[in-house]
Every structure is written in C-alpha cells, then in structure tokens.
Image (cartoon, helix red, strand yellow):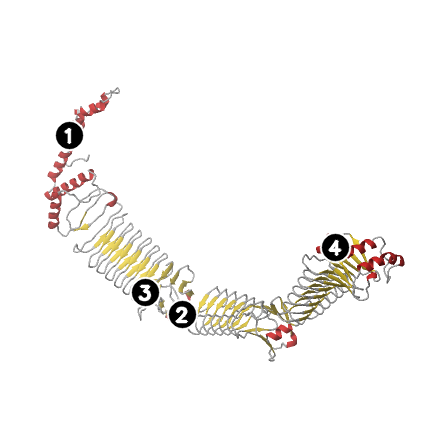
Amino acid sequence: MGRRPAGRRGWRRRAARRPAQRSPRRRQRRRPAAGWRRRRHRHRPGRQRHARWRRRQRHARWRHRQRRLPVRARRRQGHDQRLRRHGRQGRRDQARCRHHGCRRHAQARRRRAGPVDQWHSGHAAREQLFLQRCGVRLPGRGNPLCRRHHLGPGHGQGPRAGRQCDSDTLYGYATADSLAGLAGDDTLSGKGGNDTLDGGTGEDQLAGDDGDDVLRGGANNDRLDGGNGADLLQGGDGDDTLYGQAGNDTLEGGSGNDTLDGGTGNDVYLFGRGAGKDTISGYDGTAGKLDVIQLGTGIAAADVTLKRDGDALVLSIAGSGDTLRVASHFYADATYGYQVEQIRFADGTTWDLAAIKAKVQAGGNDSESLYGYAGNDSLAGLLGDDTLYGRAGNDTLDGGWGDDQVSGEDGDDLLRGGLHNDRLDGGNGNDSLQGGDGDDTLYGQAGNDTLDGGVGNDTLDGGAGNDVYLFGKGAGKDTISAHESTVGKLDRIQLASGLAAADVLLQRDGDALVLAIAGTSDSLRVNNYFSNDATYGYQVEEIRFADGTTWNVATVKQKVLAAGADNDTLTGYAGADNLAGLAGEDTLRARAGNDTLDGGAGDDNLYGEDGDDLLKGGLNDDQLDGGAGNDSLLGNDGADVLSGQAGNDTLDGGAGNDTLDGGAGSDKYLFGKGAGADSISSYDGGASDDRVAFGAGVSEGQIWLQKSGSDLQLTLIETNDKLTIRNWYSGSTYRVDGFDLANGKHLLEGQVEALVSAMAAFAPPVPGQSSLPADYQAALNPVIAANWK
C-alpha cells in the first residue's frame, strides 16, 4: 500500500491537484450536545466517499501491475494478496492460504515446476525458510533474523550458503555437498556423500552424517559431529567439541580449550603450539585399535613433558601454556580403551604406549605425582613435594627431597622418605618403611612390616600384623602409636647394635612406656602400652637387643616398677604391687590390689587407690592418699599430709607437723611422744567411730586439754607435742568419738568438756614435766579419774 504504481508517471501530481477533503471535525468548533458522536458517524458522506476513492486507487494500481506481468506472475501476485489479506484478518501465523482456489493452483504449480529452488517466507517470530521444488517465490513479511534452509533430494548439486547475520539450518543431499553457514549460529547437516561443511562465524553445529566429510567450525564455540566415515574435523577458534564417531577420523581442535572424542576407529588427534588446553575424552574398546596424537612441526621430543594426574595423561609443551589431557588414559594400566596408543612427532619420532607409561614415572624438580602399575615398579620423586603410588607389585619408592607422600599399596614394597618431613603408607603386604631425615609419619598397615623412622622425631604405626620397630642411637624422639587386638600378635622393638641391656632405662608415664638410651637424648615412647595392664592391644610384646637379649611384657612391667635416683613415676597393676620411689621426688600410684608404696627420700606423692594399701612417705614432706579400702598411712619424717579417703584407715603422721584427714569410715589417728604438732582436719557425718590412739608411755595425767578458738588442743606436758582437732566446737561432725591410751583407758567425746572446764582454771604447765604440779593434781586428779576409765 502507498507504493508508486509502475508506469503511472504524474500520478502524484494529479493526486495533488485534487481538492483536499476537509474533515468534518474541523468545522465543529463548539462541543456538541449529547449523542452527537452517533449522529456524526451516521451522517459523514465525505469520509465514506474518501474511503471508496482510496480503494479504487489501490485496485487501479494493482490492475496496472497485472497488465504488465506475465500470466504466471499474476497468479503469484494473487496468491500473495490473499496471504496478506488473511494476515490482516488475524491469521498472521499461517504460512499458506486456505483459499480453495489457492490450494488447487499451488498443486498445479508444483506439478509444473522445474528443478529450481525458490523460497517461502512466513510471518513474525515463527518465520521459516524452506528450499524446495515449488517454483514459487512468496516474499512475505516477518523476522529476518532466523531462517531455516532445507535442500531436498534431487534438487541439483553444488554449494549452498546461508544468509549473512542469520541463524541458518542447511541440509545436504545424498551426494557430495558444500555447505557454508556464514554468520549466525548455524546448523549444517551433510547427509550422505563426502560433504564439506563450514560453520563460519557463530556457535555452529555441524553433522557430517554418512560419508568422508570435512567439517570446519570456524570462529566461536562449535560442535562438530563427523558421523560415519573417515572424517576431518577442524574446530577453529573457540572452545569447540569434536566427535569423530565411527571411522578413522582426524580431529584438530584449533585454538581454544577444546574437547575431542574420536569415537571408534583409528583416529588421529592434531595438537601443537597455540592449541590451548585441549582434552581427549573418548572410549574405544576395539581390540587392536591405534589412536595417535600427531604433534605439529617445530616440536621436538625434548619440548614435550608427560605427566600423570590420577588416571589421566597430561602432555605439556615447553615454553607455552598449551596442554593436551587424555582423560582416563591409565585406567586399568592403560588397557581399558581410553588410552592413546602413540604420540608422533613431525620428525618421525614415535612414543608407543610402553614408552609413555615409562616416561610418566620419571620424577623431576617439581612437585609431581608418580604412579606404578601392576608389576614391580621403581619410582623416584627427586626434588619437590612428591606423591608416589606403587599400586600392585613389589615396588621401590623413593621420595627424595621435599615433604613427600609415599604409598606402597599392594605388594611387598620398599618405601624411602628421604629428606624432610615425609608420610609413608605401606598398604597391604610385608613392607619396609624408612623415614630418613625429618619428622616422618610411617603407617605399616596390613602385613608384617618393618618401620625405621630414621633421624628426627617420628611417629610409627605398624598396623595389623607382626611388626618390627627399629630404634637406636641418633634416632631422635620417636613415638609408637598403634593398636591391634589380634590374639597372638607379636610386635617387636629391635634395638640397634652397640646397645646393651644396661644402656636402656624403662619408665612408665601414665599408660605410656618410655624407653630411654643412657647418655643420649634419644627416646622411644609407646603410647597406651600399659592400658588395661598391657593387655588391650597397644603393647609391644618384645624388646630385643642385638646380642639376643629379650624382654617380654612381664619383664617390662616389672622393670618400670623399679625407681632410680631421679624423679620417678611408678604405677602398679591390678595385683599386689611393691613400689619404691627411692631418691627424688617420686609419684607412686598403686592402682588395684593390696599394694605397698614407699616414697623414700624426697617430697613424694603416694596414691593407694583401690585395695588395702600400705603407704610410707619416707623422708621429707610427703602427700599420702589412701583411696578406697582400709589403708595404713605412715608419714614418717617431714610435714606430711595424710588423707585416708574411704575405708577404715589408720593414719600416723610420724615426726614432723602433719595434717591428718581420715575421710569416710571409722578411722584411727596415732599420736605420741615425738609426733610433733599434728592436726586432725576431718569431717565425717556418717555413723563411724573415729578415735585418737596415744602411744606407749603416755598416761592420762600427762595430757592437757584446752579450748583454742573453735579447736580442741591436746598437749603432752612432758614433750610439748600437740594434737589439734580442728573445728571441734563447730559441730559433732568435726569431732572424734574418743581417745585411747596404751594402758587401756578411754576418754569419750562427751567427757572431754568436763576436763577442759576443770583445766581452764589453771595455766598450762611448763613443758618438760612428767606429771602435773601438786596443786594441779589436788584439784584435777578427781576429775581426770572420773572421765578416763
């Protein structure tokens, strides 16, 4: 509409000379009354005449064009006119006319059409473009950004090209085609024949289908699928995905990080400088297949480095960031179908699969991961923090320099950590682990293993099996931390030559056994050795010397109970033990059983724990704790602290100013001449019978009783020894139930106050008298005799 009709010169000038039709709206200056709009539309002859004139003009122009066109073109124009009329009536999504005559005429045209490809266009966003043998060209209106091209069979041969800036879909024939997508995100399908497909720019999808095809992705990220046949796939620029499928294909990713999958057949992967970071991810389980990586010109064997990352092979080119990763190449020792059989260089040098497997086992100066195979391998990490895996077979693994992780896995392996702080894991089998220098961690795991930490402070764990731990001078401070509950296991500490039994000192530290070498700072600690009296699975059953001398568990348990001149910690077992601290500030723990503990010289700590124990503090200021059971606590010399705890205990502070606490139970406190100034500080709210027993040579006339604050104080007038009962006047729970003399007389708790009141009238006698003065006796003897009975 509105276009200049062909052959009608002067039409615009003649139309301009026509008198202009004035709108009726312009004549109406004032607002009309109600109902004017209905009247106005009912009476508008001028506007109606104008519309009829416009229709006549359009028809005249169309008739003029029809007269100038051949018959076939007129028919096409009629068809196009009907399409536009239907579109104006709201049927714009239909691509064909529903007019009966149009369908009939279109059928006739298809019958008469020759081998000429024309094109149709639909409308709006659903517009599609079909190339077919219709002999009709319908120019239609719509969105020009998306076209779909279809090259049907029998339409002739030769190149087919999409539109610039469109997203095209091109289909080939059964024979050799050449398809070019040009710009846009195109989809090209070669169908049968040896086709050439070029995606051009855009993110294209190319499918060669059958035949020996050439697929070029062009720029951007493309997807190429060769299909059947021996195809050549070239990704071009961008991160492309190439699938060779069946046949002997050649795949070249081009620049960008590409993914290549040759599929079945003997495929060739082209790679060189500037190729980016490509990945080969394909599987072909066909027996005898031969996949090849072909390297570009200018790349020598010395420029290529092969590494293994898990089961993947990684090929790197020196001086560039380009890498080619073959996923799962080494799966099942490179026999499962993911492997590439050869790497070829432009000069003819070829690395077969055996050479590839050997090269990835060679260590370098970097931090590397080296893997063994099912056979007997030898791996050396050299410099760097390396990770070595022996896999199956009897392997030899050497970490070299760096903080290495060495894992023998299956087989009887030899593992060497080398320098620095290494971690060695033997895995299954009878392995030999050597930590070397540094603070190493050694795990023997299953099997009868031999562990040698070497120099440094090492941690050793033999795991299951009968393991041997090597130790000697210069080994440092090592720790065995292993548990195995297998009945009949036999772990052993093997001491190096030059060490005699006299050179080794055994000590117990809590539940740990500590083996020390005289004259050195070297020590070997066995954690939890004595757990459950060395029966819980943490113990090492033998300590063996180079001369054949052997200490078993029973010998070790006895040796750790013998103290020396130093500050010792001695711990008993479930039976009746005899612990002697000797010199030094010792700690003795009896555990269960009726034990005897003697602190000896020094400020000692004695713990009777369970059982009816005898605790002797010895010299100096000692602390004695009876624990459960009916214990006897003897402080001996020094200012001792005695705690009876539970049970009917006997406490004797001995010489010195001692503090006594019987705890729960019916306890007895021994006191006599030479005892010093002792104090009883006890609280017992139970139905017990606590008593103070005076030693021989003490009579009732020699004991002076007096109140001192809230305490009760008893003084032997002959020696000035004093016994103070704390908080006597604070309540009955702090009191003892009575006092006993060696001559058989007793003083009860309730009779104490009578003596205290009577003696309060006199001053305490002067120390050193064997009896009270005569005037004291005259007043006090009747009271003393009435209460001491």
Determine whether label 4 and label 2 are within 8 Å by CB: no
Disc 1 from disc 4: Cα separation: 133 Å
Question: Which amino acid, mark 1?
Answer: Arg
The three-letter amino acid code for the residue at tag 3 is Val
Q: In this view, does 230 lie to the left or right of 749?
A: left
Query: Residue 20: in sight, yes or no?
Result: no
Q: Report crowding for label 1: few under 14, some 14 to 19, many 20 or more residues within 10 A (C-alpha).
A: few
Residue 96 in the figure: left or right of residue 739: left
Check disc 1 and report the residue beneath it: 52
Which one is earlier in the sequence, the residue at label 1 or at label 3?
A: 1
Q: Mark 2 or mark 1, which has the lower sequence index? A: 1
Identify the residue position indicated by label 3 in the image. 268
State the CA–CA distance, disc 4 to disc 2: 90 Å
Question: Real-space Cα distance between discs 2 and 1?
Answer: 90 Å
Q: Are marks 3 and 4 in contact (CB under 8 Å)?
A: no
- Dot 3 or dot 4: first in sequence order is 3
Q: Name the residue under label 2.
A: 357
- For this orientation, the residue located farthest to the right is 774
Q: Classify mark 4: helix, strand or loop.
A: helix
State which mark lies toward you, 4 or 2. 4
Pick whichever of labels 4 and 2 is earlier in the sequence. 2
